[in-house]
Image (cartoon, helix red, strand yellow):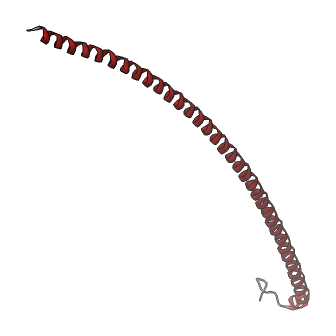
Amino acid sequence: MDLQTWVSLFAIVASFGSLYVMLRRELGSFRAELKRDIADLRSEVKEDIAGLRSEVKEDIAGLRSEVKEDIAGLRSEVKEDIAGLRSEVKEDIADARSESRAASASLSERMNRLDDRVYLLATGLRPYLEQAPQVGGSGA
């Protein structure tokens, strides 16, 4: 090979060497930028996760307070309903007792009237019963 070919080959090798060095620098700077971008993205993701955590905690706290308020409201409604039912049952029992007393008094009054009538009937029939012949074993 002649000298010109060797020079051309050396020029090609040198240009590839300089291209390699240049690409290595570019890749190094690209890698550094990429690392910075990844670090930035990580910090953004961490911040977003922290923000979402706080939002979720706030939402859960709000829901807890709402549920507690709803439960308290339902408890008071149930207590009121139970108190109303108790008073209704007490009124119904009192009404049933008064009706029972009234029925007992009416029955007692009717029994007294029946006793009086039976007594009057027996008193009125006594003379007839005393005059009536005795039925039985003392006959003829």
Relative side of 102 to 37, left or right: right
Which quadrant of the figure has residue 21? top left
Q: Is residue 1 above or below residue 75?
A: above
Q: Residue at x 68, y 47 (%)?
A: 66
Total count of labels:
0
Closer to the camera in the image, 67 or 135: 67
Which quadrant of the figure has residue 30? top left
Closer to the camera in the image, 28 or 55: 28
Q: Is residue 55 above or below residue 127?
A: above
Q: Is residue 61 above or below residue 98?
A: above
For the C terminus, give its image quadrant.
Answer: bottom right
Question: Which percent across, then down, holds residue 22?
Answer: 33, 18
Closer to the camera in the image, 98 or 106: 98
Q: Residue at x 82, y 65 (%)?
A: 91
Task: Name, please, the residue furthest toward the left.
Answer: 1
Q: Residue at x 84, y 72 (%)?
A: 104
Task: Name, please, the residue furthest toward the front.
Answer: 4
Question: Which percent across, then down, holds residue 8?
Answer: 17, 14
Question: Which percent across, then down, holds residue 99?
Answer: 82, 72
For the N terminus, give its image quadrant.
Answer: top left
